[in-house]
Image: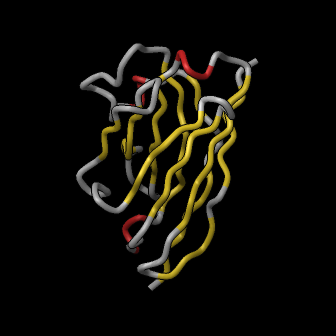
Amino acid sequence: QVQVVESGGGLVQVGGSLRLSCTVSGLTFDDYVMGWFRQAPGKEREGVSCISRSGATIYYANSVNGRFTASRDNTKNTLYLQMNSLKPEDTAMYYCAAGLRSVCPDSWSAPGTFGSWGQGTQVTVSS
């Protein structure tokens, strides 16, 4: 049984930082590309980042590029998202997802690219 569990969300002030973690079990972690998504109230779920199986290739949404850094530790079956210079518009539920693919596809920002999802962790940025 695949389990995807996010943690690390919380309330932070504008300009602050948070580090999200995502621990995965029930699958061979380094067979999967991993993604971070977010969904704000009333909005569609959007792709934040996709990281390759080795962690060597990472894609970011334009809205977070230069502020967020994704990484993974395949020895710990864990994915991370370091979020710096947070803005109110970063407020959302953040989700981690696993996709059984060899590389992050051009469509990585589409939720349908990934098959296994966590329950999410809330990030709120206050001004």
Q: Splitting the image into 4 quarters, where does residue 108 fall?
A: top left
- Residue 81 at x, y percent in the picture: 50, 51
Q: Quadrant of residue 76?
A: top right
From the viewer's perspective, is 19 left or right of 63?
right
- Position of 12 relative to 6 (above/below): below
Is 50 left, or right, of 80 in this rendering? left
Residue 111 placement (x, y as % from top left): 41, 31
Q: Residue at x 46, y 65 (%)?
A: 91
Q: Residue at x 61, y 22 (%)?
A: 29
Q: Which residue sits furthest right?
A: 1
| Residue pictured at 46% horizontal, 62% vertical | 83
For residue 86, side relative to residue 105 (left or right): right
Residue 25 at x, y percent in the picture: 72, 26
Residue 16 picture location, percent across and down: 48, 77
| Residue nearest the viewer, comparing 57 with 42 | 57
Q: Residue at x 76, y 17 (%)?
A: 1
Q: Is residue 121 above or below residue 23?
A: below
